[in-house]
Amino acid sequence: MPSTWNIIKSVIDQPSIFKSKEKLYPEYVPSYLPRREDELKKLASFFKTLVLEPGQISQRVLITGGVGVGKTATAKRFGTDIKILARQRGVNLEYVHVNCHRGRSLSYVLQEVSRQLHIPIPPRGLSSNEMYELILKYLEKNNIYLLLTLDEFDYFVEAAGNDAVYFLIRTYDAQPDATKRISFIFITRSLTTISRLDAATESYLLKNTIKFNPYSYDDLYEILKYRVDEAFYPDTIDDGVIEYIARQEGADTGGSGNARLALEILLLAGAAAENEGSPKVTIEHVRRAISETSPNISILVSDVIRYLPLHELLVLLAIVRTLRRIKEPYVRMGEVEVEYRELCSMYGETPRKHTQVYEYVKDLKNRGIIEAYVSRKGYRGKSTLVGVSVGPLDDLEKYILSIVEKVKEK
């Protein structure tokens, strides 16, 4: 038996398909953000005065959009780059990013700003007003301008309330002639929370709004393609795998448009391939990753399969077997029907006509068990393509076979 030392050494010495795994982590902010060029241009337009006329206005911009649409990454990338551009022009600009999910009080936000700017805080407890005055004096004394992003701003609004928000955004109301040292980016998932503020505060926040829409299939393909080049060695992931993940999560192909989830699937699929010593990431690795990221879907699929009629089970079994044999993300309807007829022969059943088989496929799609769509580019003529996102397929096939056997016994 191999020693513990040999087991550990074999894992360490195993060649990796990852060139830089951390490039797939949620906290990583790439130097290029595919499909967010327009949003970056809008941010640059809003904050142009920070570089060209610093101190003239205190700008406030609200970024809104769902989970995984690039709000945080875009704000961080913009903050990092505009800081460099400003300093090249002699403007001493700092960028501070505070996540309000971790701390939802005004006191926490101000403490985090002080920490990131290395502002010494007296050991005695300070009120929020005193701490803010300390920050403003520090900025003035050191001729610093600050772009402050409050991420997950929904939580701050809910916990700290209208007065705290008003306190921040109306910093210079009482001093109209003062040099405006602080500008703001607020990031929120929706405008629902903002609507709970009083009318004056809400109007201040909504004046400059940038809406981030969910990513489409094409968006996610470009994002994933870029990250694959950053994170994996060449020839370890084929375009078909990238296309498959993009189709799973693209907002226009039935997904949520969540790039964070798409990247997590890519990371888990890569880890699954590496753990089994595979030199390439396959569609089957992706199916396993999807099952890991969406365990509730896998449970739901299993529960639904238990109650399918026999011939619908056989059609589903035919889809799974064809996918396993061909090793592609999707197979043609005609190939499924050939396998289905063979299964009917094996179980002594009369195969249903094409129209009925197609109805079974539509029902399986409607139940969320399979995917089905009409082929576009890359296929000769129109054909219905079917696939299964949950996996592994061998486990799914065994499960379907067990249900078929139970149905046949009745």
Image (cartoon, helix red, strand yellow):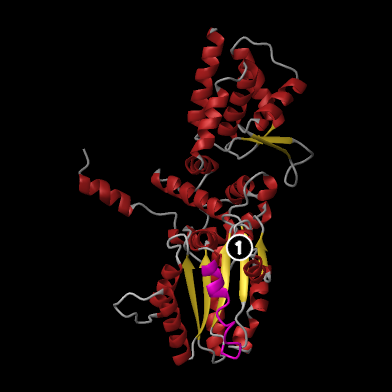
Q: Residues within 10 Å of mark 1 (few under 14, many from 20)?
A: some
Query: Which of the two residues, 308 or 64, is positioned nearer the viewer here?
Result: 64
Q: Amino acid at mark 1?
A: Leu
Q: Is residue 14 left or right of residue 147?
A: left
Give how far across and how far down residue 326 sits, in percent: 59, 35
Q: Is residue 175 magenta?
A: yes
The span shown in magenta is 163-179
Residue at point 61%, 74% (across, down):
60
Q: Is residue 199 magenta?
A: no
Q: Is residue 65 above or below residue 180?
A: above
Q: Quadrant of the N terminus?
A: top left
Task: State the residue position of label 1.
Answer: 197
Query: Which of the two residues, 358 or 41, is positioned nearer the viewer here?
Result: 41
Outermost residue, top side = 410
Q: How many marks?
A: 1
Residue at point 79%, 39% (across, down):
381
Give how far across and how far down residue 245 sits, in percent: 59, 48
Q: Is residue 153 above or below residue 357?
A: below
The answer to whether any part of residue 20 appears in the image is no
Q: Quadrant of the C terminus?
A: top right
